Image: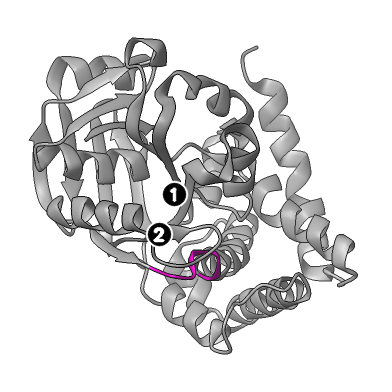
Amino acid sequence: MKIAVMGAGGVGGYFGGLLVRAGMDVTFVARGPHMEAMNRDGLTVESGLKGRFNVSAKATDDTASIGPVDLVIYTVKMYHNPGAIETIRPLVGPGTVILTLQNGIDNGDQLSVAFGKDRVMVGMAVVQARIEKPGVVAQLGKLGSVTFGEIDGGITPRGEELLKLFEKADWSVELTDNAMRALWRKFIYLTGSAEVNAATQITYGEMRTLPETRALIIDAWREIAEVARATGADIGDDIIEWCQSSLDSFAADGMTSLGNDFRAGRPVELDGLTGTVVKLGAEVGVATPIHSTIYALLKPAALRIESNLPS
């Protein structure tokens, strides 16, 4: 199977690195110093789960040079979607499957508009991972799993084939017959915790043990859950308990990617997370005072970051 990983950051680098280690034909779509280091020195993965390993990595910023592949693992940040969707067109042939492992809730819809729903599968990655330096990706702590499936639900032969492929690569992976439920649950958890983390700029350990901050996160989860149910989403009756368990599982000294990106002055996924809750709430008639307030507080900083980026 010929595989392309679109986005060689923490998620793509970690899971893609495991595929390469298992002997699979993988090309990373990357750019700049990270791409150059991968081609020169290979990709090094430093993992709390899988140990430290280095693999010979193929990386390019020219998708036309790769041509159509069997599988695109699509892991770019949500704000890159407009450009990234066009970038992967040369990778998509009649039998190509695109598996999105992004944050957010509507990436599968965006890819389906561009390529057709029959080519798209959706998944959620639960992992703390980042680029440590060019050519080196770190996976932190003991969380590093993927749950994936079809947008419309059910178990299909292609899903079972991919499950075997990922298991061979030593992924911690689950094929689900209700992938959108998994995506919604992650979206609720991630958005509530990430936005509070971005606003407070404290660690997971501080954020979850300070009573006032923990209560704010829980109320934020409840607000998103109300929006989700109003859209007809199946999120389960245990969603708040599941979110709290997830919050307590992350490394105490870490931060969310949204919090880290704000701190570092990098582009942020604010609109794809908090902004989406506000937008969906307005569409379904559910008030979102917590998310509207946090969005209003964080948006000026997001705009300053955007205005200072090179053109």
Q: Judge the density around disc 1: few (<14), some (14-19), many (≥20) Cα neighbours within 10 Å.
A: many
Q: Position of residue 100 (x, y in %)?
A: 46, 46
Task: Provide the secondary structure element on which disc 2 rests.
Answer: strand
Q: Is residue 179 above or below residue 161?
A: below
Residue 217 appears in the figure: yes
Left or right: residue 67 compared with residue 199: left
**Residue 20 sits in which quadrant?**
top left
Q: Nearer the viewer, residue 99 or 47?
A: 99
Task: Provide the secondary structure element on which disc 1 rests.
Answer: loop
Q: Which residue is mark 2?
A: 148
Q: Which residue is mark 1?
A: 101
Q: Nearer the viewer, residue 89 or 192?
A: 89
Q: Is residue 236 above or below residue 259?
A: below
Q: Quadrant of the N terminus?
A: top left
Q: Is residue 212 above or below residue 94?
A: below
Instruction: Give the alpha-carbon distance from disc 1 to disc 2, as whole Å.
Output: 8 Å
Q: Residue at x 40, y 16 (%)?
A: 63
Specify start and end residues of the magenta stretch as a single range: 176-181
Q: Residue at x 54, y 79 (%)?
A: 210
Dots 1 and 2: beta carbons under 8 Å?
yes
